Amino acid sequence: MRVIAIGAQGDIGRAACAELADRHEVITAGRSSGDIQVDITDRASIDEMYRKTGKVDAVVATLGDVHFGALSDFTEDQFMLGLTNKVMGQINVVLGGLNTVSDGGSFTLTSGVLDRDPIRQGTGAATANGALGGFVKGAAIEMPRGMRINVVSPGLLDVSVSRYGSFFPGHEPVSSRRVGLAYAKSVEGALTGQVIIVE
Amino acid sequence: MRVIAIGAQGDIGRAACAELADRHEVITAGRSSGDIQVDITDRASIDEMYRKTGKVDAVVATLGDVHFGALSDFTEDQFMLGLTNKVMGQINVVLGGLNTVSDGGSFTLTSGVLDRDPIRQGTGAATANGALGGFVKGAAIEMPRGMRINVVSPGLLDVSVSRYGSFFPGHEPVSSRRVGLAYAKSVEGALTGQVIIVE
């Protein structure tokens, strides 16, 4: 398959690409790295990305910003960052790709553990993750031409522990290899409308 | 208790108030009706609402707009309506009320069935509902002064069938009385961080 991996340079994106690259042609995209530069908050930038790739069989999105901060300090703008960037950005990747992905192709989005196993300062992420779970559940039944859509919800990755581990007390890290498998399950399998949990 | 019911004139708001009004002092608020007018997309309007109520023991929010439309026709602005109005609006009600709700008080938000039992044209609602579920899960562990937060997720109400039933094929309507009970469970009970499903 031809697969476009958006956010390929992040920890999760690397895990997905490590699993997929052996068996598929992977085109990488990212804000400032990869084969194609794209800003997922700008629909025109997404449309331009799909013009450059042409037809693809699978789209994997492993990016999106959220703010971390104590609930009592959270501002509306800080909440909206997660809603406009991680949520609307990934939804834009789907809306923009509906005509570019081949019949029976798939979208695989990325949420995270914090809407089922919350941490302090994680309300923005929990909100965004929940939104993406709801989105794929709703979108799956309306996808045209046999296309599928899922979201992978990984726990804290082993490779991310050195940077973020102190925010996740007691969370057992998940191996990057297992996270990569979840993307293979979505891309190569037949699931749709699922939150694929890796924990 | 003193309870503020925001969106009290909607079908769900009426169900909540019918259950709560016998035992509590209920102050009603809404866009254009109720004791106090409020625009939940405007934080200043929410702050003004809380200045008018003074201390309350419980906040019930049963409002928020989303767009309904086929996935293939959805625009970014139409998705953002749900994220800014139903999601950010209800989150604003919480952020604005953190200092006005009494010790041990509660917030009860409202999502809906479409992120677990989707319908055509319902992706915007599914996304918003999922976001609110994630928000209360994340927020519950950071609420100050023993405050609690839940979200009620009702199926299609009996009283709403005449207007919306044709969009919900095969959905078994839920009685308004049972929906009202869910709000009593959240306001008077001890739950926190829960999606209280009524179906």
Image (tube, coloured by chain):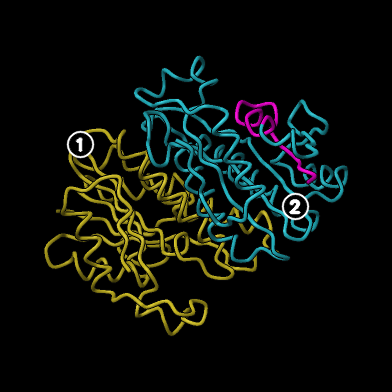
Chain colours: A cyan, B yellow
- Callout 1 crowding tier (Cα within 10 Å): few <14, some 14–19, many ≥20: few
A6 magenta-colored: yes
Residue ranking furthest to the top: A162
Residue at image x 77%, y 61%?
A103
What range is drawn magenta here? A1-18
The residue closer to the viewer here, A52 or A105, is A105
- Which label sits in the foreground, 2 or 1? 2
- Residue A139 x, y percent position in the rendering: 60, 60
Residue at image x 37%, y 44%?
B47
Which residue position holds label 1?
Answer: B146
Which residue position holds label 2?
Answer: A96
B36 left or right, relative to A6: left
- Callout 2 crowding tier (Cα within 10 Å): few <14, some 14–19, many ≥20: many
Specify the label residue A11 is tagged with: none
Which quadrant holds the C terminus of chain B? Answer: bottom left
Q: Is residue B70 above or below residue A154?
A: below
The amino acid type found where label 1 is placed reads Gly
The residue closer to the viewer here, A144 or B178, is A144
**Proximity of marks 2 and 1: CB atoms separated by less than 8 Å:** no
A166 left or right, relative to A6: left
The residue closer to the viewer here, A189 or B187, is A189
Residue ranking furthest to the left: B23
- Residue B173 x, y percent position in the rendering: 36, 77
Label 2 residue SS: helix
- Residue A50 x, y percent position in the rendering: 82, 46
The residue closer to the viewer here, A139 or B41, is A139
Do pointers 2 and 1 mark residues of a single chain? no
- Residue A72 x, y percent position in the rendering: 36, 31
Residue at image x 76%, y 34%?
A29
Determine the chain carrying the residue at label 2.
A
Label 1 residue SS: loop
The amino acid type found where label 2 is placed reads Gly
